[in-house]
Amino acid sequence: MARRVLVALVAAACLAAIVGFQSTRVVKAASSPRVFVPSPRFYLDFSPSFRTSIADAYWLYTVQYYGEHLNTDQRFDSLGPMLDLVTSLSPHFRRAYYFGAFALIDARRPDVSYELLKRGYTANPGDWHFPYYLGFFAYTFGPQGAGARAAAAWYSKAAETPGRPDFVPRLAAVLFAKGGEKSKAIAMWASVYTDGDKYSRARAVKEIGKLLPAEKQARMKAVAKLRDLMPPVQFDQLVADLFPGYY
Amino acid sequence: MRRVFAIALNTFKETIRDRILGVIVLFALAMIAGSLWLASISLDEAGRMMKDFGLVAVTLFGLVVAVFVGASLVHKEVEKRTVFVIFSKPVGRAEFLWGKFLGLCATLFVVVAAMGAFLFATTWYVAHAPSASILLAILLIYLQLVVVVAVTMLFATFTSPILASVLGVCVFVAGQLSHNVFSLTKLGHGPLVKVASWVVFYAVPDLSAVDVKASVVGEDVARWSSVAFWSAYLAAYVVLALLVASWAFRRKEF
């Protein structure tokens, strides 16, 4: 009996030690924003059969890295190389380009986003999302004047791509119109909201909120103009996000 | 032929009852199910993650079965002295080896089919659509593993089971890198490097030729005519490896 009690006590002590050690990890600081990212060439040469699996493993790591640093130090030093690795190993992994382009805004590298999307477009020329997002980046982060012209060209390309939704040509038309720079910027962010993942949608709501007038009636009027530029479901969601409690 | 099938059936019954096999399959199923968790943190790429990690799990666990069971199959019979009972009957050494090979291939088929069916069902559940390409990829993984079984059995005829297992794994890895060796045949410096590269290139089975994992996740477009051609190449490789193994086994002294 005494032996059993002793065994039970040892087991309980070991269990407590394991839980105790592991619980100290909860208070550990965020990992370094600079991490080692191997060259894509290495994996392409030494594991061609498993290249997509490695790309997927790095994709999970990239999402985790982004989420972790977004909530802590806002530093994304290795995000660019990580996305380069994922998309080099898996050039048709479209979500990696879309997500990466918007995540790189947080790294203050929209220029890298633009290049990433251009590479994505070269690898996936039949996908209208690439010129659509390239237009957005050219307009929002490009040089004044030239950026808008480049954006219009990209949106025209998106509008010509088979399979694009109906609102894309309308968006291109808005960009070609003269004046109303603020409305154009709102329309651009609305386009991101229409087709983005949860991170880029949250960012779009924030940016549109900043661009809209302060007065409620004027805000609603400005948002109403987006009705023709978005699918109805997304428009309703955007209204709900911008005006909580509206519906 | 009847004798070969009798040995194959016996080997199948013997290996399928092995508890370690059950543990490996359970581990593989747990790993495939674990991909569900990975899929949940993939930002709307659950289907892709399931397919990719699931196929890797099937390949690696299948490799464990192929190599470790393949390496010990003949050795076990010799160690238990049951091989003398078998050879006292009108059974040739080559027939014995082919029977063992076919029996293990049948076991491997059951194991890979079980993992493949589970992966197919799980992916269907996650992606809300069945993916027939997974089944084809599983079939080609099975073909690669059959080659590994044949090569491991060849090594097992003249080395210890442990060394045969290690060599079997090495051949699998080398088989995935065959294109690099081919590059060396063109770019290698000096005639010795070039000749050695050509020898390795022809000696090692090009397993990557029938790998369609990338096309299952939409990365490549599989050219099925080419896959059929390379499958025939691997079948020829298996037959040749077993012929050499039979020759070596005939000369082996117990």
Image (cartoon, coloured by chain):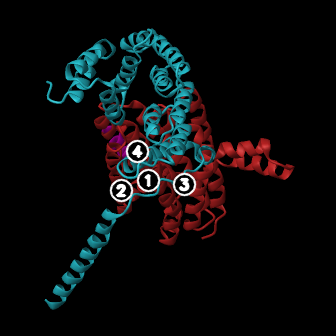
Relative to residue A90, is residue B44 drawn left or right?
left
Crowdedness near tag 4: few (<14), some (14–19) or many (≥20) residues, C-alpha within 10 Å: many
For badge 4, the amino acid type reads Val
**How far separated are the C-alphas under marks 3 and 1?**
29 Å
Q: Where is residue B34 in the image (x, y as percent from the top left)?
A: 33, 50
Mark 3 or mark 4: which comes first in sequence?
3
* SS type, badge 1: helix
Most foreground residue, B151 or A177: A177
Q: Do labels 3 and 4 share a chain?
A: yes
What main secondary structure does the magenta stretch of the protein show? Answer: helix
Per the image, the residue denoted by label 3 is A36
- Residue at image coords 67%, 63%: B251
> Which chain comes out red in the rendered image?
B
Residue B3 in the magenta stretch? The answer is no
Per the image, the residue denoted by label 2 is B27
Mark 2 or mark 1: which comes first in sequence?
2
Crowdedness near tag 2: few (<14), some (14–19) or many (≥20) residues, C-alpha within 10 Å: some
CB atoms of marks 2 and 1 within 8 Å:
yes
Q: Position of residue A28 (x, y in %)?
A: 36, 63
Q: Are marks 3 and 1 on the same chain?
A: no
**How far separated are the C-alphas under marks 1 and 4?**
28 Å
The correct choice, above or below, for B97 with respect to B129 in the image is below
**Tag count in the figure?**
4
**How far separated are the C-alphas under marks 4 and 2?**
27 Å
CB atoms of marks 4 and 2 within 8 Å:
no
Locate the N terminus of chain A and report the quarter of the image it occupies: bottom left
Highlighted range, magenta: B113-121
Q: Position of residue B85 (x, y in %)?
A: 49, 66
For badge 3, the amino acid type reads Phe
Q: Are marks 1 and 4 on the same chain?
A: no
